[in-house]
Every structure is written in structure tokens, then in C-alpha cells.
Amino acid sequence: MNTFEARLSAMNWDEERESIYAKTAADVERALQATNCGLDDFKALISPAAAPYLEQMAFKSKAMTQKRFGKVMQMYIPLYLSNACANACVYCGFSHGNDIQRITLSLEQVKQEIDVIKSMGFDHLLLVTGEHPAQCGFEYLKSVIRFVKPFFSQVSIEVQPMHEDQYRALVQEGLNTVYVYQETYHQHRYKTYHPSGKKSDFNYRLATPERLGAAGVHKIGLGCLLGLEDWRTDSFFTATHLSYLEKNFWRTRYSISFPRLRPHMGTFQPNFPVNDKELAQLIMAYRLFNADVDLSLSTRESMIFRDNMMQLGVTAMSAGSKTEPGGYAVYNHALEQFSVADGRSPEVVCDMIRQQGYEPVWKDWDDCLQ
């Protein structure tokens, strides 16, 4: 099997970017009429030429989402276990160089956190850590997953990349989903944002979804950090990665997330800011491109934006999120990884979902769609 690294090395960032920006209204109209959109259609849908067609994109995205997923919204919540990190990412509050208090939750503290989370109604838990092999590496994660799995129908992680055998071991403990974001596919610029630490190895991170597929992980979450590089080009490469994985690991399910740079500890500002209209265009383009992929929108985004996007392609939302270790019960005043924009409680978010004629669901899609 050819690797995605080999496929990516045969592509050129600047050429793909020029191709996207060269798309015309005729290209967009052709994509909107297509029964099955390809990658070239996706280019048209995320291009500047698609801006006048957002209403048509919204209508089709809404219909496709309801046909595949029904009128439901999957609810999840992140539990930040540790802010220890050995990387020096310039855009992250957990960066190794930031002078902050480092905290890793004990199992006793994890139990306090999940007691609060369960009282909110959540049955889908996302475990998040910084990337520090000694403080919050494989053995720590294995013990936490084993500990929390009896309380939740679905356990996911967003942590440092690991080896295939380690992922296999975590699947045996009950791991369902792994989210791993390349941040940017611009290899020549990648090192600028990740100057040191294991995350600075572009190709090791790039191959992580392939290790996940080989390890039999049920679902893989992809994404790029919107704001680092040109969002259209990075999103095209993300979609290309998704297509490659679906072809080679067809038993696995996939999701796309849309992390947009938020305020954090440090001075980094987005190089390519993404406004709400552009983010809406991107989300709808993904739905038109892939009817089956889960699309997730976190509390990074504002209340108004999340409410408006709920029917236009999104299938999963977090609510009541805290982005620091111990944010629900322990209250140790650790630094947030990023600032939350939608601070509504899960109860209020669920009321909004019901007011729009949808139903919040708490289990995995496999349970809901059977």
C-alpha cells in the first residue's frame, strides 16, 4: 500500500493553492449539481468563487445531513487530564516554553471529574492531554481509559501520537475514537510552528492515522488548525487525506473537526484569519463532499455561530466544556489550553437543539442509527 506521505510528496502546495483560487462560478455550479463530489469539486466549493452560492450550499448540506443522520446531534464533552507538554508549539497555551503550573490528574481526581460530567448527562467522553510521554503517556492513558470506560459508552482521546501496538492495547481497554490533527499540511512551514519536541516530526505525525487504521481503531478524527496557513489549501489537503484513508481503511469511520485559533497563553496571532462566513462555507463544503463523515463543532465557536450551523452539516457538538485539567470538579486553577467562546451549560445547549426540532443524543452514532 502506498503511504499518504508518498502521495503528499508528489503534490505541490503552491500549485494546489493556485488551482483552488482559479475556480470559477461554472466550477461551483458543476460541483453543486454533482451526485458524488470529488476532490476537484471540493476545491470549487471552498474557493472564493463559491461565496455567492452559500445559500444553495446550505440547502443541499442540510438535506444531505438529515438524510444520513436524521434530526439528531451527538453530544460529547472533553476531560483535560494534563497540561504537561514536551512540545514548543508557538500557538498553544500548553507549550513547553510557557511558564505555567503543570498538572496531571490522579485517578482519584479523574473520578471527581467524571462524577460531575455524568451528572450533566454525558455518555461520550473525550480525554485530552498535552504531549508529554513521561507525565501523560501510554501507560497513564491506559490506566485512565480502563478506569473511566465502565462509566461511558464511548471513550475517545486527543493526545500525543503513539505506535500501532500501543493503539491496539488501548482499543482492548475500550478506546473507540482517536482525534489527531496535522495542524498544517504545509510541510515547509510546519517546523516554524513546531520548532521542538516530538511533534516537530512532520512525517511521524502524518502517518498516525495509518497506524490507527492498522490498529483497528473504530473512528479517526482529522483536522487542520484554521489560521496557521491558508485555510482553503490546508482543508483541501485534509480532504485528500480523508479520501486516502477511506479507500485504504474502509472499515474505519471518520470525523472532521474545525479548530479555529483562539486566544491562549502567548503572543501568536493567526497568519490567515478565518471569518464565520468562511468557516460556514468550509463545513458545508465537507458535507457536500462526503455524506457519511461526522462533522464536529466545539465550544471554541460562539453561541450564535453554533446555533446557526446546527442544521447545516454539523453532527456532533460539545457543551459545558472546560479546557484546563480539573476544570469540572477539582478547580485547581490550571491554565486553559484556549479560551472557550460558547460557555452555555449542556442543559441550555440541549434546549437550543430541541427548539430547532432536533434531539440531543448521548451515545455513539452506531447505537443511534441501528
Image (tube, helix red, strand yellow):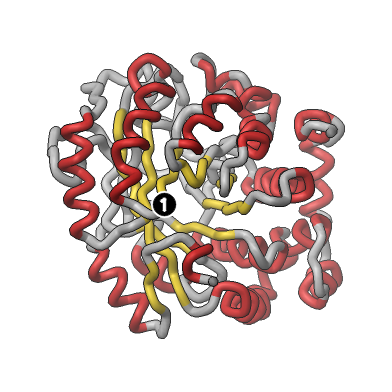
Q: Is residue 236 above or below residue 315?
A: above
The quarter of the image holding the C terminus is bottom right
Residue 122 position, x and y percent, is 30, 58
Residue 76 occupies quadrant: bottom left
Residue 252 position, x and y percent, is 65, 49
Residue 154 visible from this viewpoint? yes
Read off the residue under disc 1.
Answer: 154
Residue 108 occupies quadrant: top left
Residue 138 placement, left or right of 10: left
Residue at image position (81%, 44%) is: 16
The quarter of the image holding the N terminus is top right
Residue at image position (33%, 18%) is: 135
Residue 171 position, x and y percent, is 50, 38
Element marked by disc 1? strand
Dot 1, crowdedness within 10 Å: few (<14), some or many (≥20)?
A: many
Q: Is residue 213 above or below residue 82?
A: below
Residue at image position (42%, 80%) is: 358
Q: Is residue 51 above or below residue 219?
A: below
Judging depth in this view, the residue of 336 and 355 nearest the camera is 355
Residue at image position (46%, 71%) is: 310
Judging depth in this view, the residue of 331 and 216 nearest the camera is 216
Residue 312 position, x and y percent, is 54, 73
Q: How many marks?
A: 1
Residue 266 visible from this viewpoint? no
Residue 239 placement, left or right of 160: right
Amino acid at the residue labelled 1: Gln
Judging depth in this view, the residue of 219 and 348 nearest the camera is 219
